[in-house]
Amino acid sequence: MAEVIKRTLENPSTSTLVDNGINLDATRSSNDDSSSFTCEICVEQVPSNAKFKNMEITNGCSHNYCKGCISKYIQVKVIQDNTSQVKCPNTNCSAVLDTLSCRSIVSKEVFEKWCRAHCESAVLLQSSKGGFAYGRSYCPYRDCSELVLNECVETNAASKVTKSKCPNCKKLFCFHCMVPWKENHRCTNRSETIIDIDSNDVLFIENVKRKKWVRCPSCNCYVERTGGCRIITCRCKTSFCYNCGEKACICKYKLCFYDILMTCILLSPFLVPFFICWLISLGIKKLLVYFGVITPDQELARGINTGRRQQQETKSQ
């Protein structure tokens, strides 16, 4: 995999990369080919030479997309979602986009991050299937976050690995604590906030405490929940509770707001008709009183008489 990535980076496609990685003027303004198609994302007529062709689609996928839309779609999936397998934008299609086929329509930054996501996914998959589980850590610098492997995990020296250099950004960090390296660094429990900091890290520690960030129980990276359910999924594919930080939730919040909301949505077909009937009956009474068909006193007297009649029937029984 590494050799393929290196060869592709050294010999990129001759296509000119502009903005998000594609020369849109060269693809959309060319009218040499009279035939065109409708892109299923932007719903515009696009020349056939601007049509995206995925060389690894073998399961009958026939969805039509232009290169510009696919380029932006891949960028969102890779940069924001950190996804290694990018599927067809159609929700009913399971076709997977080929990374090398998309090299010419994405930027170098997106392609490199996509390749790193593939490598990370392969390592995690091998470990989950009982294969060789490398010791892994992540570069703590926000503009990097590179996956770093310790291939000596089965030796006694593996537990002593602390000071490490990121192979991507070349910065030093502690492999165990996953924090930037400092002089006289002392490793602490990963569940605790690192205390050997300098003045440059004060803002970060304040953010951790103020925003109540939680560390993933598997990879120990800080995770921030921006919204949604309390059960979140880390970049290492581990799901855990954001409230207690455990894979198996042990906190008192057995149901979150979204669980209750989904329950209400499922019951809405049964509850809505009764609610509508109640509103209609209430509205009819208001209209009858408004137009003088019945008076408020008559309505009150009717309710009192009904109550007395029910009491008499109960006594007679």
Image (spheres, rainbow, N blue to C red):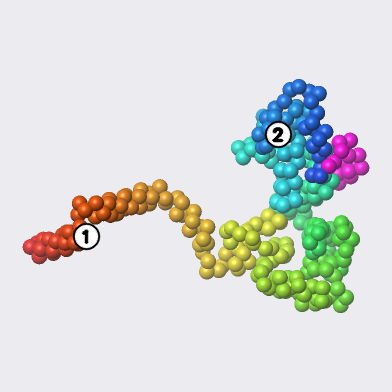
Viewer-side residue, 182 vs 284: 284
At a point 70% along the width and 27% down the height, the residue shown is 37
Whether residue 276 is in magenta: the answer is no
Front label number (1 vs 2): 1
SS assignment at label 1? helix
- Stretch of the chain drawn in magenta: 1-18
Circle 1 sits on which residue?
296
Can you give x and y, in whole percent of width and height, for residue 183 in the image? 88, 75
**Residue at the right extreme of this rendering:** 10
- Residue appearing at x 81%, y 39% in the figure: 22
CA separation in Å, label 1 and label 2 = 66 Å
Image coordinates of residue 23 in percent, x first then y, are: 82, 38
Q: Nearer the viewer, residue 67 or 19?
A: 19
- Tell me if residue 61 comes above or below residue 253 in the rendering: above
Label 2 sits on residue: 65
Image point (42%, 51%), residue name: 267
Q: Is residue 39 left or right of residue 257?
A: right
Given the image, on which type of amino acid does mark 1 rest?
Answer: Pro
Where in the figure is residue 311, as x and y percent of width and height? 13, 64
Residue 66 figure quarter: top right
The residue lying furthest to the front in this view is: 291
Q: Is residue 266 visible?
A: yes
In the image, what residue type sits under mark 2? Tyr
Left or right of 127, for residue 252 = left
Q: Residue furthest top?
A: 34
- Residue 74 screen position, x and y as percent: 74, 44
Quadrant housing the N terminus: top right
Q: Is residue 245 above or below residue 21?
A: below
Residue at image location 67% in from the left, 37% down from the top:
41
The one of 123 and 6 positioned closer to us in this rendering: 6
For disc 1, the neighbor class at 10 Å (few under 14, some 14 to 19, many from 20) is some
Mark nearer the N terminus (1 vs 2): 2
